[in-house]
Image (cartoon, rainbow, N blue to C red):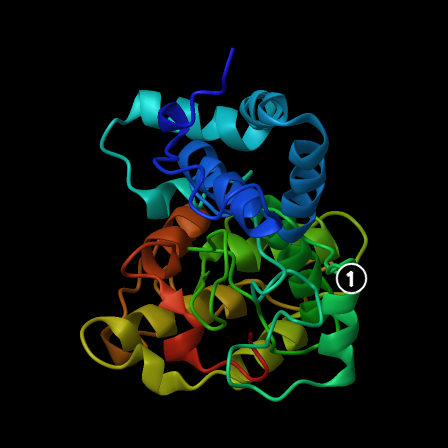
Amino acid sequence: MAFNFEQYGVSNPNLYGDTTAGRQHNIDLIFQNVLGRNADSGGRAYWDAQVAEKGDQAYQDLVNTAMAGAEYKDRASAVSANPNITEAELDSLSSAYVSPYHHGSGSAVSTWRPGDMLNQGTADAVTSGYSDATNTTVADVISAFQAHNAETLAAGGSDIKGTGNITGGVQQSGSNTITAEDVLAAYNQGAGSITGDGSDGSNTATGAGGLTMDDLNSWWSGIDKSGFGGGNGMQDFMQFMMMMNMMGGGMGRGMGGGSQYGYGGLNPGGVSQAFDYKDMASWMKDTFGSGSGGTTTGNLNLTGTT
């Protein structure tokens, strides 16, 4: 039985004839219809060779293989749950493919864009079929960024990479949101978990690690505070800094002593005296979390952030 090209979005499979250009044209259109993207370079080369050898049967093999993978299954499940889901939302699924040119791919071509000069590293990556890419899905990028954040904060650095709004394909740098989860995940990787609410000065940190109060202060010192201007921004910033001070004598070494702020303490800048630190994670998510109100690498201007 002949392969049904139209079913998979290929209206003119003979546009370029039975040539490499023609086969790859068909392969890309099938990928677009089934997975919402062009074929990656390795996949395109592989299926081109298969079609050249087996003919139409290889196109069916391509469809069957794509539909058996997590990328297709996750997209299908998301569409089933929400028929109005957008392509951008599908591209943010954890299994969504990340191009070597994506800013979090780890490849030497990740920062290259048309018009940029080529360097040896970029040329080598292209020649090797982008074999230097270490992250191929959104989940891979998020995992790599979280590991980077933990290492950076533990070393007292300020180059925090946000994991919010990361999408597949090619994503320009500086477009991802720094969420509350990013900071908490970095802390928990570096120094265990926070326990206690600070009301009686009994906060403690469990687990080994080197993340301290000085580490977080160093991170904040690298931030352009103008990003917190307007509206409730400065109050939010003050509340966050009071929460940090509440943790006392150093994250990762046991936290005692409480804070001079909150629970009846000082009241700088009109911040409520009775701010409930027990809901710290929820407050951080609401204030600095993902979405349109999240803090982005663009408006924070963190040093060295990509």
Q: Position of residue 226 (x, y in %)?
A: 33, 86
> What's the residue at 26%, 82% (across, down)?
229
> What's the residue at 66%, 69% (across, down)?
249
Q: Position of residue 140 (x, y in %)?
A: 65, 48
Whether residue 47 is visible: yes
Q: Is residue 253 left or right of residue 218?
A: right
Whether residue 187 is visible: no
> What's the residue at 78%, 62% (across, down)?
132
Residue indicated by mark 1: 132
Label 1's element?
loop
> What's the residue at 27%, 73% (across, down)?
233
Q: Position of residue 228 (x, y in %)?
A: 32, 78
Of all residues, the one furthest to the front in this rendering is: 17
Q: Residues within 10 Å of mark 1 (few under 14, many from 20)?
A: some
Identify residue type, mark 1: Asp
Depth check, front residue: 133 or 191: 133
Task: Check the image and report above or below for 137 versus 155.
Answer: above
Quadrant where the C terminus is found in the figure? bottom right
